[in-house]
Image (cartoon, grey):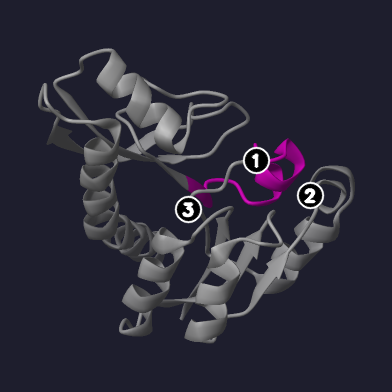
Amino acid sequence: MKRIVIFASGSGTNAENLIKYFNNRAIASVILVLTNNPHAKVLDRCKNLKVSALSFNRTAFFQSNDVLNILKASQPDLIVLAGFLWKFPDFILHEFPDKVINIHPALLPKYGGKGMYGSYVHDAVVANKETETGITIHYVNEHYDEGAIIFQAKCEVKPSDTAEMVAAKIHELEMEHFPKVVEELLQAQETIS
């Protein structure tokens, strides 16, 4: 069975969706959730779903091998960033080539980069009068939101839409597509190996 490790910073709706999805699949399970926020709601979700979860600080992530060693011990087939706000350190990426993916709440390359997350993205989409937006699932590299794109899904933005309305549409796309794309990536790994 394939092993998934999730990184999240906030409420954890995507993490919960992935955990529940893979609870009913033979291919993989979420074995661990890691967060950089000791007060993140994702920790409560994991407790309720009986999935191991740990929080860590900047030092453990950027200046020591603490998080790297946890990952090595977990032997993940895929590391999934689901609303994780810190830039992934190069030294961790080098240990897990082509195994770290992220979901972004816009159609990259638009509205990507440092500081572009959550409501900041939706506010910008509405302010610029975009007619469509969506989600992008991509590999993580050493630059914010610049890794190879794996999948995109679009939705319409109406002139009357508020940022909150756009956020709701994006959330629906995330819930529908993220688990399936993760599953397809894991299936592709099996074909290669």
Local crowd at mark 1 within 10 Å, few (<14), some, or many (≥20)? some
Tell me if residue 6 is in the magenta stretch.
no
Disc with the residue nearer the chain's start (3 vs 2):
2
Q: Mark 3 points at which residue?
A: 82
Give me the C-alpha separation between circle 1 and circle 3: 11 Å
Label 2 sits on residue: 61
Residue 181: % across, % down: 30, 55
Q: Do the residues under discs 2 and 1 have CB atoms within 8 angstroms?
A: yes
Mark identifier at residue 86: 1
Label 3–label 2 contact, CB within 8 A: no
Q: In this view, does 68 lie to the left or right of 102?
A: right
**Amino acid at circle 2:** Phe
Asked whether 123 or 113 is in front, the reply is 123
Residue located at (48% from left, 47% from top): 101
Instruction: Report helix, strand or loop for mark 2.
Output: helix
Mark number displayed over residue 19: none
State the residue at coordinates (36%, 38%). Answer: 105
Local packing at callout 2 (Cα closer than 10 Å; few below 14, some 14-19, many 20+) is some
Q: Residue 82 at what x, y percent from top left?
A: 48, 53
Say what amino acid the circle numbered 1 marks: Trp
For the residues bearing labels 1 and 3, Cβ distance under 8 angstroms: no
Quarter where residue 44 is shown? bottom right
Secondary structure found at label 1: loop
Residue 77 image point, x, y percent = 53, 65
Is residue 99 one of those drawn in magenta? yes
**In percent of the image, x 23 and y 31: which residue is there?**
162
Q: Which of marks 2 and 1 is nearer the N terminus?
A: 2
Horizontal arrangement in the rendering, residue 141 relative to residue 94 (left or right): left
Please say if 8 is above or below 21.
above
Residue type for callout 3: Ala
